[in-house]
Every structure is written in C-alpha cells, then in structure tokens.
C-alpha cells in the first residue's frame, strides 16, 4: 500500500483507550484530561473488523497502544482477535509496564509477539516524580515477566530532554545491555508546536520513511502523529476512511492541536 509520496504503508498503531494509570509530566497534566465517553470508544469487534480491512489493503504490522492499553478490560482478548487475522506478521504493544507482570504470560499465549516498555530512569524517586506516583519496581518486574513469557525482543522507550548522554539515559542503556534488552531514546515532543526529532535506535521521526497510520480510541484514522486530520471509520466506513487517510498522509509532520499522546500513542 503506497501513499502519494511512494512510501510503503504497512504499519497500523491502534490506541485502545485514552485512560492511563500514570500521569507522566510530558504526557498529560496532573489533573488528568477530559476522557472519551465509554460508549464512544471503539468496541473490540469494530477494531478487529477495521484491522481486517487494513490488512487486506497491505497492513502487516500492528501495535496496540493507549493511553495505557493494559487498563482496558479484556485487552488480552483483543490481542487474540488480531493475532487470528491472516496477514498480521508483527503484533506488538507499547505499555508503561506497571501492570505487565500480571499480563505477560496471557498476552504471549494470546499471540502478542513483543512489547515496548516506557522507562526513563532507574532512580525510583525520579521515576515517581516523572510519572506522578508510579512504582519503578513494578515496571522492572513487568520487564522480567515479559522476557520469561517469550515476548522478544523487549524494547525500552526512554524519553530524553536532548541527548542519550544524559545520566538517566546512560543508566537505562547500561541496564538494557545487562538484561538483553533493546533501547530507543525519544526526545520530548510537542504536538502543538510540531517539535519532534529522529528516534535514536528506532525508525520514528523519519518522515521520508514513515510507514504508519494511527487509529484513535473513538475511531479516527489519523495519517500522521503531527497532523490534525482524521477520518472516522464509523462515519465513512473502514474502506473509505483508509483510502482518505492514505491519500491525506503529509510529506512531513507539522502540528497536532486535536490529540495528545495520551489518546493517540507515541
């Protein structure tokens, strides 16, 4: 599936919820945000039906995101439903890891292949500050559980201010090396101003190589993280929304005043 700039679009990121059990300072305000009504959030059947259409059109890689995907009830069943779609060759999830220890085995058995876990520091005090109350040790247990369950590779998403040479980032890198994990360093982004950069150790931020579309919890298919445009799979239907999103994918990102990271994923 090619867009108008001849980029091969084969990657669908599905945000299954705008809810999260953390309040990371670079993601949402302390008081939280106005949440989508439960009745407006896509059902698992709707998500799966759209994914089938997208896979038939050329999508082969699917990532489940949030918010925090593990706070949505029954998400393991959604993993199973997507894993059963013929043509999905890479099924992954991005999580903050807080609940991962209790889900890792079930997710692997349902067909999840790998996980990305957010980890910005190994200092429990700093971690609690950045996440406004998160427990670092729950995340570390989740990472260990994911490895034992066979969710490999486990990739660590580490948010940095400017460079991987920052002290916390170096400690995270050393931890990953010891534990056999892969690490990606992501500079803090600002959707409203269009501030973003290339991900160190990953493919994000390379607009010329972008291969992804994003489905929000309420069913808006967005062609770019840094774009206000979106197409409702409920109003337009899956096929037409996919067509319009593909045709509207910009050459490079600009700004997004409609979404936040909490409801579209990173």
Image: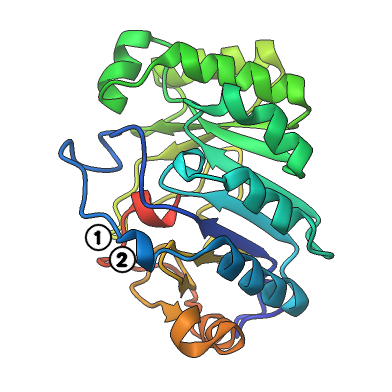
Left or right, residue 172 beside residue 40: right
At x 54%, y 31%, the residue is 117
At x 59%, y 24%, the residue is 102
Q: From mark 1 to mark 2, how far is it between C-alphas?
A: 5 Å
Residue under label 1, please give it: 192
Left or right, residue 237 beside residue 8: left
- The secondary element bearing badge 1 is classed as loop
Question: Count of labels shown?
Answer: 2
**Residue 202 x %, y %:** 60, 44
First in sequence: mark 1 vs mark 2: 1
Q: Could you classify mark 2 by the number of other residues whose Cα lies within 10 Å: few (under 14), some (14-19), or many (20 or more)?
A: some
Tags 1 and 2 touching, CB below 8 Å: yes
- The secondary element bearing badge 2 is classed as loop
Q: Does residue 85 lie above or below 204 as drawn?
A: below
Q: Tell me the number on the disc at residue 256.
A: 2
Q: Tell me the number on the disc at residue 64.
A: none
Q: Does residue 118 lie above or below 63 as drawn?
A: above
Please say whether residue 128 is visible from this viewpoint: yes
């Amino acid at each position: 599936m090619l867009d108008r700039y001849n980029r091969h679009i084969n990657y669908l990121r599905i945000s299954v919820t705008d809810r999260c059990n953390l309040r990371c300072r670079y993601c949402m305000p302390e008081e939280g945000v106005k949440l989508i009504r439960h009745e407006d959030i896509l059902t698992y059947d709707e998500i799966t039906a759209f994914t089938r259409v997208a896979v038939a059109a050329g999508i082969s890689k699917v990532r489940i995101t949030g918010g925090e995907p593990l706070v949505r009830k029954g998400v393991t069943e959604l993993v199973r439903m997507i894993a059963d779609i013929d043509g999905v060759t890479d099924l992954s999830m991005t999580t903050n890891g807080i609940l991962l220890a209790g889900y890792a085995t079930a997710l692997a058995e349902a067909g999840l292949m790998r996980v990305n876990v957010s980890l910005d520091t190994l200092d429990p005090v700093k971690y609690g500050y950045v996440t406004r109350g998160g427990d670092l040790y729950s995340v570390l247990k989740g990472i260990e559980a994911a490895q034992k369950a066979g969710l490999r590779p486990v990739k660590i998403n580490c948010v940095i201010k400017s460079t991987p040479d920052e002290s916390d980032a170096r400690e995270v890198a050393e931890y990953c090396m010891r534990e056999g994990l892969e690490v990606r360093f992501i500079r803090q982004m600002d959707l409203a101003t269009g501030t973003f950069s290339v991900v160190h150790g990953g493919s994000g931020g390379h607009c010329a190589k972008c291969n992804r579309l994003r489905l929000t919890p309420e069913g808006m298919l967005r062609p770019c993280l840094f774009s206000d445009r979106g197409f409702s799979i409920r109003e337009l239907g899956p096929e037409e929304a996919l067509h319009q999103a593909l045709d509207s994918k910009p050459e490079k990102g600009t700004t997004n005043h409609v979404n936040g990271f909490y409801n579209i994923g990173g």
